[in-house]
Image (spheres, helix red, strand yellow):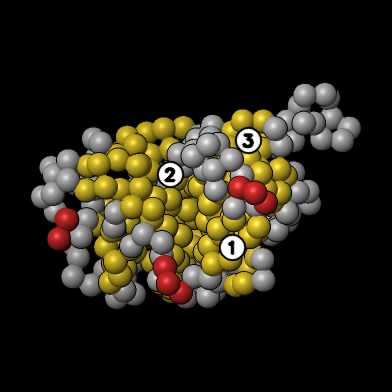
Amino acid sequence: MSAPGSPAGSPRFTRLTGRDTTLAGALSVRRVLPAAAKRSVGPFIFFDHFGPVTLPPEVDTDVGGHPHIGLATVSYLFEGGFLHRDSLGTVQAIAPGAINWMVAGRGVVHSERVPEAERGHPRRLHGLQLWVALPPELAQCEPSFQHAAAAELPHVSLDAGAAGRVSVRVLVGEAFGVRSPVRTASPTLYLDITLPPGARWTLPPLAEEQAIFSPEDVLTVDGEALAPREMAVLPAGEAVALQAGPEGARLVLVGGQALAQPVRMWWNFVATDPALIEKAAAEWAAGGFDPIPGETDRIPAPPWRALHPT
């Protein structure tokens, strides 16, 4: 199906295929945002999908202490677990179905480690790691951390005709009459949607910008197949027709208000002003940033390369 005024047969959505890398010898990660065709969707500027995988006992997926500025990290798991620690003193298990939202602001350091009970055992891991850019006026705010357990996140069940009902969990933002308890700095939407087998369902426009991504299932979007681990950036202000295959489909929707201005990214730092990134890089290299209580290891930054002023 083609958009009004577009060439016949051209898709109504922008397809982002992402690129794969391997961490810790066994953990495959696909990075979908940022992409050359689309740097951000709403305030989301970074989208990593990892797993699903069963990791052997000897694989260590610990991510030691590392800094962030100017963003909020959003962790969401389908399977497995991590233990989050940060320089605010937070110690929080990251469990499937929960949202962990860390605002870096002027600067925070955190680590994500294998839970002690799972060390030395095969373990499943599957999830998403996203970054949200903070509005320029809040980019240097005080850091903070929010945890919303799976049971705290609202759920709605929507009619999908003869196929059954569509399940929607509102992880962040507001949709279909319910609101997540997670506090955001700008209009932000993050949904976990499950379609029953063979369901045909019309997804309405819920945000200024929005995109969908299915980790494992083929979807049909306005009559065109979308492969697992591909993102479809949807046309602004328009509904799209989704169809699940014979086994159903699970997908996430991300979106929200478009960025007021583009952001710059270098390593783990985000800012509209490159000088803030350079300052943070120098501070980390000099041993700065508040430490994580009880931890001493620090991941070194890559060699600094000055950002182009534009």
Q: Position of residue 233 (x, y in %)?
A: 65, 42
Note whether residue 211 is visible: no
Determine the CA span between mark 3 and mark 1: 21 Å
Q: Which mark is residue 157?
A: 1
**Amino acid bearing label 2:** His
Quarter that holds the C terminus: top right
Q: Position of residue 122 (x, y in %)?
A: 17, 46
1 or 2: tag closer to the N-terminus:
2
Determine the CA span between mark 2 and mark 3: 20 Å
| Mark 1 nearby-residue class (10 Å; few <14, some 14–19, many ≥20) | some
Quarter that holds the N terminus: top right
Give the residue drawn at x 22%, y 56%. 114
Front-most of 19 and 173? 173
Q: Secondary structure at mark 2?
A: strand
Q: Is residue 3 above or below residue 73?
A: above
3 or 1: tag closer to the N-terminus:
1
> Mark 2 = which residue?
49
> Mark 3 = which residue?
220
